[in-house]
Image (cartoon, rainbow, N blue to C red):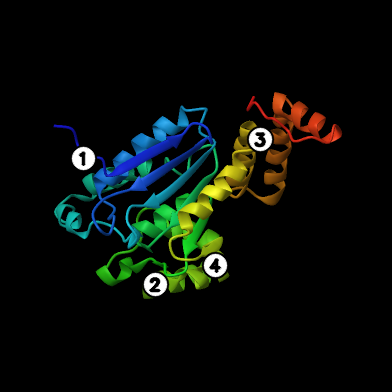
């Protein structure tokens, strides 16, 4: 019997947009099956040159992802440190494939984004949240802390002091507060996160995929480097973008005062 699909993808070939939907119960909890199925879908996307932009959302209207499947935690209690570490490394490798995609990703937050849900949202390049959404890292209330990148990504997005406050207290924040601190890019009305994400994805899909890939690489890798090293990396990638066919089309279209028609080469 086939394993139930808790993570689903719909690809629109015409627009170049792929929508990943987490569909795991009413609250779309983050189980190990969800993590590994997400990784499998990311592997498929990575090999599909027709996909320009990826949107991630949750099924229903209550939760983008309300957190981890706490019932699974009981399975880890009796593991040795070595086995627990190996298991965590394996999960991280699959989970982080979303962050490693070489094209723009957008999280459409249609409900609660707590714990692993907040960490999932932070894997994406851009986050669009509906006005009723609550975000946070409540793990401390269970006697643990974020274990899927939250302790590293949250400080990079909102600053060390704010990230520590959110993780020390474990209290959720509203979408508007999250926007004010830089965790969320846009706040939209209830039910509008996916349409807003599609609108943005459609605009991005009109750009050159080689340029988008190199741009994302420049930002992501540059964030881990000193300013001087990051500028050197930018120069290297800027040189590479000049080897593409799309830059010739883009420059020609500008000079001829017409819209560019990129071939993604």
Mark nearest the camera among 1 and 4 is 1
Q: Kindly identify which numbered label has been placed on residue 211.
A: 3
Q: What residue sits 57% from the left and 43% below the top?
A: 202
In the rendered image, the quadrant that contains the N terminus is top left
Mark nearest the camera among 3 and 1 is 1
Q: Is residue 35 left or right of residue 163?
A: left
Q: Nearer the viewer, residue 50 or 98?
A: 50
The mark tally for this picture is: 4
Distance from the alpha carbon under mark 1 to that under mark 4? 35 Å
User: Please, what secondary structure does the residue beneath circle 4 have?
Assistant: helix
Q: Are marks 4 and 3 in contact (CB under 8 Å)?
A: no
Mark nearest the camera among 2 and 1 is 1
Q: Kindly identify which numbered label has been placed on residue 37.
A: none
Q: Residue tagged by mark 1?
A: 4
Q: Residue tagged by mark 2?
A: 172
Q: What residue sits 33% from the left and 52% below the top?
A: 59
In the rendered image, the quadrant that contains the C terminus is top right
Chain-order first, disc 1 or disc 4: 1
Question: How far across and down, in percent of the image, does residue 192 sit?
Answer: 48, 59
* Residue at the right extreme of this rendering: 255
Q: How many neighbours does mark 2 have within 10 angstroms: few (below 14), some (14-19), or many (20 or more)?
A: many
User: Please, what secondary structure does the residue beneath circle 2 have?
Assistant: loop
Distance from the alpha carbon under mark 2 to that under mark 3? 37 Å
Chain-order first, disc 3 or disc 1: 1
């Amino acid at each position: 019997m086939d394993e139930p699909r808790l993570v689903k993808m719909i690809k629109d070939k015409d627009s170049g947009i792929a929508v990943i939907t987490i569909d795991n119960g009413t609250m779309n909890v983050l189980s190990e099956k969800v993590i590994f199925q997400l990784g499998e879908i990311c592997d498929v996307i990575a090999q599909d040159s027709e996909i320009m932009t990826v949107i991630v959302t949750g099924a229903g209207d209550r939760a983008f992802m309300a957190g981890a499947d706490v019932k699974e935690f009981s399975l880890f209690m009796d593991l040795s440190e070595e086995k627990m570490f190996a298991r965590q490394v394996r999960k991280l490798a699959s989970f982080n494939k979303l962050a490693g995609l070489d094209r723009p990703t957008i999280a459409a937050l249609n409900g609660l984004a707590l714990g692993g849900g907040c960490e999932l949202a932070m894997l994406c390049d851009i986050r669009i949240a509906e006005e009723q959404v609550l975000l946070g890292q409540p793990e401390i209330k269970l006697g643990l802390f974020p274990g899927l990148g939250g302790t590293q990504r949250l400080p990079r997005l909102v600053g060390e002091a704010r990230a520590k406050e959110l993780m020390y207290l474990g209290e959720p924040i509203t979408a508007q507060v999250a926007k004010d601190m830089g965790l969320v890019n846009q706040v939209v009305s209830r039910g509008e996160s996916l349409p807003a994400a599609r609108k943005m994805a459609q605009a991005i899909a009109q750009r050159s995929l080689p340029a988008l890939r190199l741009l994302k690489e420049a930002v992501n890798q540059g964030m881990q480097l000193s300013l001087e090293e990051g500028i050197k990396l930018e120069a290297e990638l800027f040189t590479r973008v000049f080897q593409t066919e799309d830059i010739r089309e883009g420059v020609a279209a500008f000079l001829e005062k017409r819209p560019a028609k990129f071939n993604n080469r």
